[in-house]
């Protein structure tokens, strides 16, 4: 009897709900939205999730909480057709074994530290030598191969995902326990905004960046050499053969590094130029103009074939333009495509490489207890 009345109640309640609710039609699903899915399992059993942020116009970014990696980014071409414009892997294994940093947040120190060594407040610290004798992108695992806590933030216009990672004192050789939060927001203006905040309990250094490889054609079998690029920079920080900055600035005037007006990347990439030889192409930090700690437009990429435009905004003093020179057809990416030479480009907002060993370079990358590290960088998509 009791069971029967509970059942009756459930049927009536269910009928009530059905009557009160409009029929849900997938095509009229409310946007913006965040969809969470299991992406894979790490060897130790921990689960990795993907979060797809979709805005009102259907533009969508999928981010996983392993490495805080952007694994796909669907943006419209000039005909409104959505397609994926970032390189990546089909499965978690790809990200676990990656040597390319596809889509991840790198840190604690994005880019290189000479000989993996720096001094801070009278102590000398030794980091892993994972790039010849230098340290690159935070070390062996860095922030790109660890599991972050993820917190979706539903917002009526701008779906977002906040990822937090606590890097213990001594991790990868860096001092102090650092808590870094990175919030990805997909705005109604088709902008993927990345906001970082970091704190520490002991003096340390912090210079994280984002490492998506963009190919605006959405066809990763094509190179990025026909993409046109603008970088608002009058100088680069030239490097030695191991890509460590010399400590000087090089004026871009009359060099293949003058991107102050939109210029095809392929136009001068094979020029007889020592810096291009050292980089095997472009792999250089540009000294961005108008640095005053506020966000300003610093770069633009245009692909005439699709009409896609990518504008980069940041509050950082530098940006690493990397033309995918280490891709050589051996990395198997999404849909089984082996990524060939220069089929993706990175624009990594940062403080200058090797700043801990270049005291003349400001701003300081030192973070002390009580201070908060902040960075805002946006990748904004449109068409023309
Ligand atoms: C950065 C570096 C490059 C390369 C890539 C990853 O852009 O500057 O030299 O290490 O990351 O392959």
Image: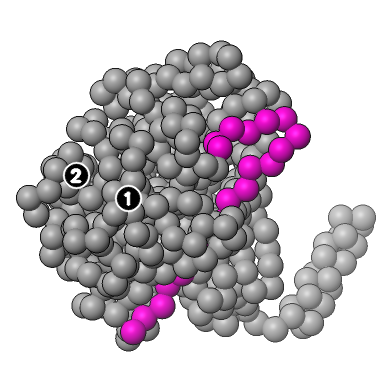
Instruction: Residue 141: tell me if it is visible.
Output: no
Does residue 34 appear to the left or right of 338 in the view shown? right
Say if mark 2 contacts mark 1, CB within 8 Å.
yes
Rendered location of residue 310, percent (x, y): 38, 69
Q: Tell me what residue is drawn at x 19 percent, y 61 percent.
A: 254
Rendered location of residue 321, percent (x, y): 31, 52
Between 328 and 334, the one nearer to me in the picture: 328
Dot 2 lies on which element? helix
Say which quadrant the C terminus sits in. bottom left
Specify start and end residues of the magenta stretch as a single range.
Answer: 364-384
Say which mark, if any, is on residue 236: 1
- Real-space CA distance between mark 2 and mark 1, rounded to the nearest whole angstrom: 10 Å
Q: Earlier in the sequence, mark 2 or mark 1?
A: 1
Q: Is residue 126 above or below residue 295?
A: above
Rendered location of residue 120, percent (x, y): 56, 21
Quarter assignment of residue 239: top left
Instruction: Residue 365: tell me if it is visible.
Output: yes
Q: Tell me what residue is drawn at x 41 percent, y 33 percent.
A: 354
Between 334 and 264, the one nearer to me in the picture: 264
Q: Tell me what residue is drawn at x 87 percent, y 55 percent.
A: 3
Mark 1 beta carbon near ligand 1 (under 8 Å)? no
The residue under label 2 is: 275
Say which mark, if any, is on residue 116: none
């Amino acid at each position: 009897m009791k069971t029967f009345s509970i059942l009756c109640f459930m049927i009536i309640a269910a009928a009530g709900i059905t009557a009160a609710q409009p029929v849900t039609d997938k095509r009229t699903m409310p946007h913006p939205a965040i969809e969470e899915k299991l992406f894979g399992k790490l060897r130790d059993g921990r689960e990795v999730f993907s979060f797809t942020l979709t805005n009102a116009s259907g533009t969508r970014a999928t981010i996983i909480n392993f490495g805080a990696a952007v694994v796909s980014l669907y943006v419209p071409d000039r005909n409104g057709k959505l397609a994926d414009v970032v390189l990546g892997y089909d499965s978690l294994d790809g990200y676990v074994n990656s040597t390319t940093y596809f889509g991840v947040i790198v840190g604690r120190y994005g880019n290189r530290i000479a000989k993996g060594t720096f001094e801070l407040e009278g102590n000398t610290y030794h980091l892993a030598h994972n790039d010849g004798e230098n340290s690159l992108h935070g070390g062996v695992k860095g922030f790109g191969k660890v599991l972050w806590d993820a917190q979706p933030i539903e917002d009526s216009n701008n779906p977002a995902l906040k990822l937090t990672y606590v890097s213990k004192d001594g991790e990868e050789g860096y001092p102090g326990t650092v808590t870094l939060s990175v919030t990805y927001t997909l705005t109604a203006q088709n902008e993927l905004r990345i906001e970082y905040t970091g704190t520490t309990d002991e003096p340390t250094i912090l210079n994280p960046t984002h490492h998506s490889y963009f190919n605006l054609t959405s066809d990763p079998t094509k190179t990025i050499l026909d993409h046109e690029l603008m970088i608002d920079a009058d100088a680069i920080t030239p490097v030695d053969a191991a890509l460590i900055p010399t400590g000087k600035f090089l004026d871009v005037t009359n060099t293949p590094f003058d991107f102050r007006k939109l210029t095809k990347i392929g136009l001068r990439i094979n020029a007889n130029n020592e810096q291009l030889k050292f980089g095997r192409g472009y792999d250089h930090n540009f000294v961005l103009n108008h640095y005053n700690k506020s966000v300003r437009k610093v770069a633009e990429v245009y692909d005439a074939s699709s009409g896609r435009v990518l504008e980069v905004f940041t509050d950082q003093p530098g940006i690493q333009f990397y033309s995918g020179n280490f891709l050589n057809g051996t990395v198997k990416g999404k849909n089984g495509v082996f990524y060939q030479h220069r089929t993706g480009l990175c624009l990594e907002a940062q403080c200058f490489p090797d700043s801990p060993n270049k005291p003349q370079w400001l701003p300081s990358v030192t973070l002390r207890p009580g201070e908060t590290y902040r960075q805002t960088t946006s990748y904004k998509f449109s068409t023309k």
